Image (cartoon, rainbow, N blue to C red):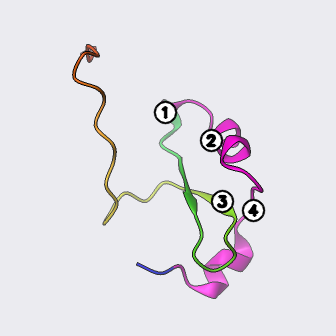
Amino acid sequence: MRTRLSVCKRKRRFGSEAEALAAAGTPKTGLRHYRCDRCRSFHLTSRLKGKRIPRPPANEVIAR
């Protein structure tokens, strides 16, 4: 799904993936980064609909 220009203009832009990851904080915050198809910078989002979330490696134990 393409980012609307009006949404892109309102969001904070990060010049690198590392900056966006640092701003997102821990995975528990619910934020993830993505590269915007409008400005080619990185933004943060909490939206998950239509996005694939990478699975953890098979050798990692998931705590419950």
According to the picture, the residue beneath numbered tag 1 turns out to be: 27
Viewed as shown, does residue 45 lie left or right of 16? left
Task: Say which element carries label 1.
Answer: helix
Q: Quadrant of residue 41?
A: bottom right
Mark on residue 46?
none
Tell me the distance, in whole angstroms, between the alpha carbons under discs 3 and 1: 17 Å
Task: Say which element carries label 3.
Answer: strand
According to the picture, the residue beneath numbered tag 3 turns out to be: 42
Give the mark nearer the N terminus: 2 vs 3.
Answer: 2
In the displayed structure, 57 sits above or below 2; it is above
Image location of residue 45, percent across then percent down: 53, 57
The residues colored magenta run: 3-27
What secondary structure is the stretch in magenta mostly built from? helix
The magenta stretch spans residue 52: no
Tell me the distance, in whole angstroms, between the alpha carbons under discs 4 and 2: 12 Å
In the displayed structure, 52 sits above or below 49; it is above
Q: What is the quadrant of the N terminus in the image?
A: bottom left
The amino acid type found where label 1 is placed reads Pro
Crowdedness near tag 4: few (<14), some (14–19) or many (≥20) residues, C-alpha within 10 Å: some
Tell me the distance, in whole angstroms, between the alpha carbons under discs 2 and 1: 8 Å
Viewed as shown, does residue 63 lie left or right of 30? left
Image location of residue 27, percent across then percent down: 49, 33
Crowdedness near tag 3: few (<14), some (14–19) or many (≥20) residues, C-alpha within 10 Å: many
Q: Badges 4 and 2: C-beta atoms under 8 Å apart?
A: no
Q: Badges 4 and 3: C-beta atoms under 8 Å apart?
A: yes
Tell me the distance, in whole angstroms, between the alpha carbons under discs 2 and 3: 11 Å
Q: Residue at x 29, y 26 (%)?
A: 57
Q: Nearer the viewer, residue 1 or 30?
A: 1
According to the picture, the residue beneath numbered tag 4 turns out to be: 13
